[in-house]
Image: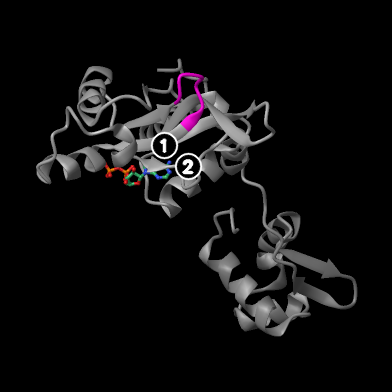
Amino acid sequence: MRTIELTKRQAEIIRIVKEEGPITGEQIAERLNLTRATLRPDLAILTMAGLLEARPRVGYFYSGRSVPNPFTEKLMSIKVGDVHSLPKVVVDTATAYDAVVTMFTEDVGTLFVVTSEGRLEGVVSRKDLLKVAIGGSDLHKLPIGIVMTRMPNIITTTPEESVFKAAQKLIAHEVDALPVVKPMNEEDGTESWQVVGRLTKTNITRLFVELVQGGGDFHIPGKL
Ligand code: ADP
């Protein structure tokens, strides 16, 4: 991960050192038709940034260590728990019609389907409902269990996961929302999950705007 902005000359220096290192400052200057003195500040920056290493009597060689950038560091430290919204759910006894109504009244594009104890059973998206609607099914009679994508195929996140990791999941699985979950203690020892939130592309977009507007400062927005 390259995270500092290099000038054209600094990029040239890196290229030369990658190809020819170890190489002395004098030799780099020759390649660039510059004096050693002119190059000194660039070499100092590149060495301090950890991109080049300087060995006495040997010269410079490329180390290529990535340099932490404050914006990236800040982003990586923000957790799903800092930005997610409240979950919008329907119970597993609901019909497809109930889900359509809930989607409208709650103004969301994704609903989580839960048992009466709050255990995550499935996810239903706008298109899942449109599909059955155009298929001519009677939505009043259609159980939501037939429409939803069900466990264990649900991609989830946790409050402790980094927003960056969760954003990668949204992209990789081409979905709009992830249920934010916590493990639930089942008496029979089976693994199940309680839904505690909803992480959507909108949360990520809002965070992006906040970070840029705040110059990298992030104030935890109110959970919606
Ligand atoms: P839409 O289908 O309205 O464009 P999505 O892209 O979010 O919305 O959903 C695509 C499909 O993936 C749907 O069938 C939906 O049930 C399913 N889906 C949505 N979110 C998840 C998730 N977090 N995990 C697994 N499947 C999901």
Mark number, residue 220: none
**Quadrant of the rendering where the N terminus is positioned:** bottom right
Is label 1 in a helix, a strand or a loop? Answer: strand
Mark number, residue 151: 2
Amino acid at circle 2: Met
Q: CA distance from mark 1 to mark 2?
A: 6 Å
* Residue drawn at x 60%, y 40% as measured from the top left: 76
* Residue drawn at x 64%, y 79% as measured from the top left: 16
Residue 117 covered by magenta stretch: yes
Query: Front-most of 57 and 18?
Result: 18
Q: Residue furthest top?
A: 222
**Quadrant of the rendering where the C terminus is positioned:** top left
Is label 2 in a helix, a strand or a loop? Answer: loop
Query: Relative to 85, is 6 on the left or the right?
Result: right
Query: Which percent across, then down, holds residue 215?
Result: 49, 30
Residues rendered magenta in the picture: 115-120
The residue where tag 1 is placed is 122
Query: Front-most of 3 and 56?
Result: 3
**Neighbours of disc 2 within 10 Å: few (<14), some (14-19), many (20+):** few
Res 66 → quadrant: bottom right
Q: Can residue 216 be spotted in the picture?
A: no
Amino acid at circle 1: Gly
Query: Relative to 148, is 66 on the left or the right?
Result: right
